[in-house]
Image (spheres, grey):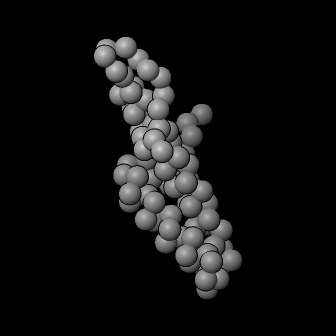
């Protein structure tokens, strides 16, 4: 049986920055407490989907950075972007 399209299917097309901005807006609205119960549940669910999307994009970026961590043609392993 085919799975119906998710109501948050558009999220996978968002850039990290746009998804994070929308997530921040949702958190702000929920923290203010001026959202009715049903809407708060709906936007909370969207917020969770946005958080998962942002997490996935961050992990992909981290993997790309790890691949770039090479010295003299020999992998040196994983290093932080901003070593202190």
**Quarter of the image holding residue 72?**
top left
Residue 33 vertical placement versus 40 (above, below): below
The extreme right residue here reads: 37
| Rendered residue at 43%/44% (across/down) | 82
Residue lying at the far left in this picture: please name it: 72
In the figure, residue 70 lies in which quadrant?
top left
Q: Which residue shows up at 47% across the image and 38% down it?
A: 80
Residue 7 drawn at (x, y percent): 52, 56
Observer-nearest of 15 and 81: 81
Q: Is residue 58 visible?
A: no
Relative placement, left or right, of 66 versus 7 is left
Residue drawn at x 47%, y 23% is: 77
Residue 12 or 52: which is nearer the viewer? Answer: 52
Q: Based on the displayed image, in which of its 4 quarters is residue 3 positioned?
A: top right
Residue 31 rendering spot, x and y as whole percentages = 62, 77
Report whether residue 66 is seen.
yes
Looking at the image, which residue is at 41% across and 17% down? 75
Camera-nearest residue between 17 and 12: 17
Q: Quadrant of the N terminus?
A: top right
**Count of number-bearing discs:** 0
User: Looking at this rendering, what residue extends furthest in the bottom direction?
Assistant: 34
Residue 35 place in picture, x, y as percent: 61, 81
Residue at the limit of the structure toward the top, as seen here: 74
């Amino acid at each position: 049986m085919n799975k119906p399209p998710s109501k948050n299917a558009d999220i996978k097309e968002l850039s990290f920055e746009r998804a994070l901005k929308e997530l921040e807006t949702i958190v702000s609205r929920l923290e203010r407490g001026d959202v009715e119960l049903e809407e708060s549940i709906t936007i909370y669910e969207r917020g969770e989907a946005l958080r998962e999307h942002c997490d996935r994009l961050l992990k992909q970026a981290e993997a790309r950075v790890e691949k770039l961590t090479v010295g003299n043609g020999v992998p040196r392993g994983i290093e932080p972007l901003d070593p202190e």
